[in-house]
Amino acid sequence: MKKIYLIAVVLTTAFFGCQDDDYDAPNSFYDVGLYHSLGQQALEINIYDYITFANLSQNYSHHEWTIGEGNFFIEGPFTFRDSSSLYETRIINPGDTTSTDKTINVYFKKSGLQKVRMFNIFDEYVAFRGFQNGSAYTMEAEEINGKWVIDTTLTVKVYDTIVPEIEVRQANVLLDLESTDTIYVEAGDTLEFTDKTTIGEPTTRFWWARTFPTEGAEPETVASGNQEVANLVFKKLGTFQAGITVSRSGENIPADSDRLIISRPVKVIPSSQPFVLTGNINEQEDETIKIPFNGEFAPFFNKESFFEVKVNDIVFNIESVSINADDSTFLDIKLTEPIYRPDVITVTLLDGSGIESTDTRTPVSFTDVPVNMHDVNLLPIGVQGAEDFGFQGSDSWGIHGDNKGTVEVSSEQASTGSYSIKATIVPGEANVQPAAVLSQPIILDPDANYIFKYKRYIKPGSVVSPTARSGFFFIQNWTQQGWTNYSNGTEQQGVWNEFTITWKQSQPISQIMFRAIIDGNSASDAVIYYDDFYLVKEELRP
């Protein structure tokens, strides 16, 4: 059963007298109050649900509830298991929009902003203090013809049932979703799905294409996405069912969801396009070389001799070539020897391998395609640049306590993304000092070197004193690193210049503070931007 929460009960009758012995005890006790079954939650519910309202007022001479047309009074009691089918049978006097009952159950069958009005008349002054949609408010009774009137209206947001509405396009042609004809898609091609749902105010969606459900077997999802406009790639041959699940959720928002299954099956047929490398070849964290193609591979074995991998222009032995376990449009290559970050690697696929796609295409050979090496930045995202707008506490840039100049986040210049750290110094100021506090210290290998990189941009027209310098402190040990003096004031302005620091440190890094500008003569008048901070453990091939 729905819980009933008291939201306002306020004693409001005032008594006045000059002396204690002039006091006359009142014959009546007047107050006004109201509760509803959502308590202090926002008045937001799903359509075909109800809310209980109760008038707690005492000694009123007249009382009346009014609701909007299309909604109904219903007779309780109810349990949490009850549904709209029961509510329909409990409607009281269909069409009535007023009631003099102290307690009412309002069954909302109309979506949008719905009104529930409580109108009370008293012989004495009263005031109502209420709580609605997260805010407190006070309403004093209005005197009308010698009576005191409380006239308050609560607004209930009623969410409609979600009704999914979508469009599907193939090669920019809008498809007829009323038809049941099969949609034919070549392997590796896409269909464009657009969510146009508005009824029910959804907050999320999930597109899916899957094998048709069968008894005793879970459907296999072959493509999915959650964008408003999603281009789903169909790689696997077969006939599939496609659709969308649209949902509404959020704090204090009544949940709802609905699923729409497209009436037209999607049949993926062999592609007429060449079976080719598509996208970049990337090294993974586990030193696997991952090669993407525009179709799925049929199983194969012992094809290592048809691939050639060069590391720093030297052919390395291949341990294995296999189809990626999670996505069969990728090939995985493992070498017999370790890979190091500075390595330059290329991959070649020779003709005659006998490897085929699942739709019987032969992969097109390629020669010496470069591999993007796996990289890692040990700094938190908010410290790598200023894209989180900085100055948000830990894991972002802020101002060191000894700062004299101006430190801010700026969109005026950026090496990567849209923002950078802007350091401004004017004559008479000795320094500009940004700093970042890390929520989790970076633990360093005391036997290894570390590489720290950053970029800076001097605004054209800046005057940088020959004595001005820049340098970093990697705290906890406060060791000064990477001091530069702006080339005695001759560093090229108007371009992003990259700087590299290599050092060894045994203590963890819990903070990074840098003197963007420190000027012993306090003569600089400059604006300098910083971006693309990068920290990594140095790797060197033995």
Image (cartoon, rainbow, N blue to C red):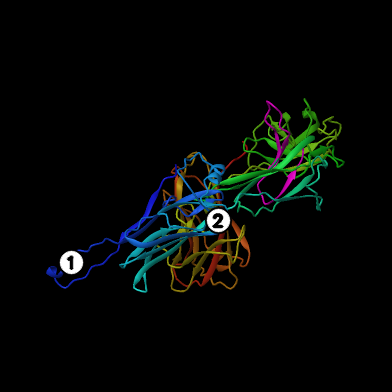
Residues 488 and 534: in front is 534
Residue tagged 1:
24
Picture residue at 58% right of the left edge, 46% below the top: 256
Picture residue at 36% right of the left edge, 55% below the top: 56
Picture residue at 61% right of the left edge, 66% below the top: 492
Residue type marked 1: Asp
Q: Earlier in the sequence, mark 2 or mark 1?
A: 1
Q: In which image quadrant can residue 418 be found? A: bottom right
The spot of residue 64 in percent (x, y) is 43, 60
Q: In which image quadrant can residue 142 be found? A: bottom left
Residue type marked 2: Gly
Residues 362 and 166: in front is 166
Disc 2 from disc 1: Cα separation: 48 Å
Q: Is residue 307 left or right of residue 339?
A: right
Query: Residue farthest to the left?
Result: 21
Q: Is residue 439 left or right of residue 530?
A: left
Q: Is residue 479 visible?
A: no
Instruction: Give the magenta range.
Output: 209-235
Q: Is residue 506 above or below residue 523?
A: above
Q: Quadrant of the N terminus?
A: top left
Quick one: label 2, few (<14), some, or many (20+) residues within 10 Å? few
Q: Secondary structure at mark 1?
A: loop
Residues 222 and 42: in front is 42
Residues 285 and 141: in front is 141
Q: Is residue 120 above or below residue 45?
A: below
Q: Secondary structure at mark 2?
A: loop
Picture residue at 27% right of the left edge, 60% below the top: 29
Q: In which image quadrant can residue 336 be found? A: top right
Which numbered circle lies on residue 95?
Answer: 2
Q: Is residue 231 magenta?
A: yes
Mark 2 near mark 1, Cβ–Cβ under 8 Å? no
